[in-house]
Image: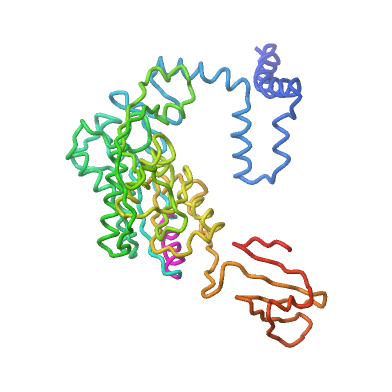
Amino acid sequence: MRSYRPYLIGFFLAVIYAVPVTQTAIELYRGDRPQFLDVFTQRPTSANLRSFERALERASVLNRFVRPWTQYLWYEALRDPGDKAVLGRGGWLFYKPDVRYLVEPAPDDALPAIITFRGQLARRGIRLMVMPVPGKPSIYPDRITGRADFADGSVSWHTSDLIARLRRSGVETIDLLDAFVSWRRDGGAAAPLYLEHDTHWSGDTARRAAELVAARIHALGWFEGGSTGYAEKPVSIRRRGDVIRMMDVPRLESSFPVEQVWCEQVVRADSGERYKDDPHSPVLILGDSFLRMYQTDEPMAAGFIAHLARKLGAPLASIVNDGGASTLVRQQLSRRPELLEGKRVVIWEFVERDVRFGTDGWQDVPLPEEVRGAPSKRSVSESKDRRFSVCISGQCLCASLNDHPLELFSAADQHRGTPILEWNCGIRSVR
């Protein structure tokens, strides 16, 4: 037996090293830099290492060639759609993190982050409304397994608990979970609230959710409504579910039919022009791909945002980031604080699975402090004797780092021709 050990060891080493050696040889043959060298160009943080691992997997020639065939055979033999999907009853597909969210412990990071964000907005006189969106398994658990019974309603206890704690903390929260359960009971199997092969809601569900939120905003008196008239135009699209695309097995796509989705496209009543956002709107909405669906995807202007604008009678401002509603949308807002100017209401939408799986978690994201009574543009000048000035509306307060007294002068004096440094939205440029 010992005489075979070197051969077995050699065989396993060859299997282990064959993949990276082959990949490197192919990249060099193409004239590319070997992918594995990228690991030395970044700091070895957990985020960078995960990003490197994903890039390495995407670039792998062997992975692109072998994996689809292996996954296809695996599905045909065992009906296993892979590590991102769950095959339910009647051919329904579910996104695996949606299912995991229901059965695994949920962290307690979301509540403190939401309360902090509400306080940041309140200091600016802006009200926050939070809207967790249930995942498809929460409303259709019986489509995953026959052992689940919908008779008692949703099984999303984590989301129910979060909504209750948010409300106890004084955060205005829309309970779509309870609404969706009621709508499913009323509509029955003839009107699914979600697409069969997609993670997202149907066009009609997006419209009804928007109308629910608009009614709550009106009831609270947060926004009396605008004067823009909108009309609806029925349209239909054919959509292949995103869960099918995430499986990344083209040969399986024919096993799942394209779904026809009916939507109501929102157009201006006066011109027939499709709905468009307005960054100067008093209402800002933050969210994820549930807001993108039917809005910037086909058929466009038929999603939640457009229907909320229709019911409020005014266009909205929005920041949408697929999978990034927990932290990334707030980071984008922090980099664009001008979007908060003139805002009265911020609506924050996120899918419930982000409570556990949100990209970058639930970080505290500081917002730039509002400068009251000051214009958005300020100019600061500095002379060779380290003198500087802050100019507002043509009047400048001049100070010096060399213990010179303060003095007031007009911007028209050009302050001895010293260079002007100008700030606009936090970006400094020299003129």
Q: Residue at x 53, y 54 (%)?
A: 331
Name which residue lies at 42% across and 26% down. Answer: 244
Instruction: Give the camera-side residue of 400 and 159.
Output: 400
Q: Which color scheme did the rendering employ for the protein?
A: rainbow
Can you give x and y, in whole percent of width and height, for residue 205 in the image? 29, 41
Residue that appears at 70% across and 44% down: 42
Left or right of residue 61, residue 362 in this image:
left
Among all residues in the image, which is located at the extreme front? 271
**Which residues are the magenta region?**
110-123
Instruction: Name the spot of residue 299 as percent of width and height, x first.
Output: 39, 35
Q: Describe residue 275's horizontal placement relative to residue 218 as left or right.
A: right
Q: Give the answer, above or below, for where 391 lies relative to 7.
A: below
Q: Quadrant of the N terminus?
A: top right
Residue at the far bottom in the pictured view: 405
Residue at 28%, 47% (x, y): give it. 177
* 391 vs 146: above or below: below
Name the image quarter holding the C terminus: bottom right
In this rendering, position of residue 22 left or right of residue 220: right
Whether residue 116 appears in magenta in the rendering, the answer is yes
- Main SS of the magenta part reads helix
Q: Is residue 133 magenta?
A: no
Percent x, y of residue 53: 61, 35
Q: Nearer the viewer, residue 50 or 319?
A: 319
Residue 56: name its quadrant. top right
Percent x, y of residue 294:
38, 38
Q: How many numbered badges does the structure rendering display?
A: 0
